[in-house]
Image (spheres, rainbow, N blue to C red):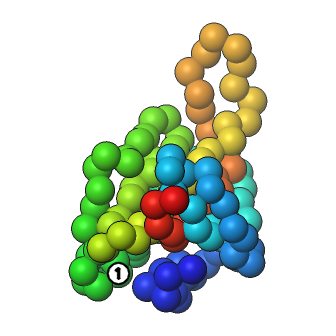
């Protein structure tokens, strides 16, 4: 993991880094946090996480790479680039109790991820 991701966002319990190549044509390492469970407002837990990394990484010279950005109801990917390296911050949501053909709604569990790596 790139040292710029440390310290990891506090308030979450993080896994050990494991190697991955699931991001487009990038290879590197990723850590995941144990889920924030039974959340009723996703932005309440995701906004501070995203703000922490935005302020931290941009102050260290990382820039947002919108070509890798994605988002939707309950998920978001923000990619930062510095030279040939990337750091990707993302979260995914597991909506509970949503019925087929109905809009997704909370309560839900939110899982956070931090990836760092380079182009293969």
Tell which of 106 and 70 is nearer to you. Answer: 70
Query: Which residue is tagged 1?
Result: 56
Please say if 94 is above or below 19: above
Residue plotted at (30% across, 73% down): 83
Left of 45 or right of it: where is 71?
left
Residue at the (72%, 70%) spot, across then down: 18
| Quadrant (top left/top right/bottom left/bottom right) for the N terminus | bottom right
Task: Residue 112 in the image: state x and y as whole percent.
Answer: 60, 61
Frontmost residue, 53 versus 96: 53
Q: Is residue 88 above or below residue 70?
A: below
Residue 99 vertical position relative to residue 114 in the rendered view, above or below: above
Residue 50 image-quadrant placement: bottom left
Report whether residue 56 is seen.
yes
Look at 35% across and 81% down and name the residue there: 56
Point out residue 62 in the picture as x, y percentages from the top left corner.
29, 74
Q: Secondary structure at mark 1?
A: helix
Residue 7 position within the rendered picture, expressed as x and y whole percent measured from the top left: 52, 88
Q: Residue at x 59, y 32 (%)?
A: 105
């Amino acid at each position: 993991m790139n040292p710029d991701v440390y310290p990891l966002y506090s308030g979450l319990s993080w896994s050990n880094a494991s190697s991955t190549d699931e991001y487009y044509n990038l290879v590197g390492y990723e850590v995941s946090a144990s889920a924030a469970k039974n959340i009723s407002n996703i932005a309440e837990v995701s906004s501070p996480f995203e703000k922490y990394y935005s302020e931290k990484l941009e102050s260290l010279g990382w820039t947002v790479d919108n070509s890798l950005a994605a988002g939707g109801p309950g998920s978001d990917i923000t990619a930062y680039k510095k030279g040939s390296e990337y750091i990707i911050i993302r979260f995914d949501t597991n909506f509970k109790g949503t019925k087929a053909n109905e809009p997704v709604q909370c309560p839900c569990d939110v899982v956070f991820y931090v990836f760092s790596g380079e182009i293969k």
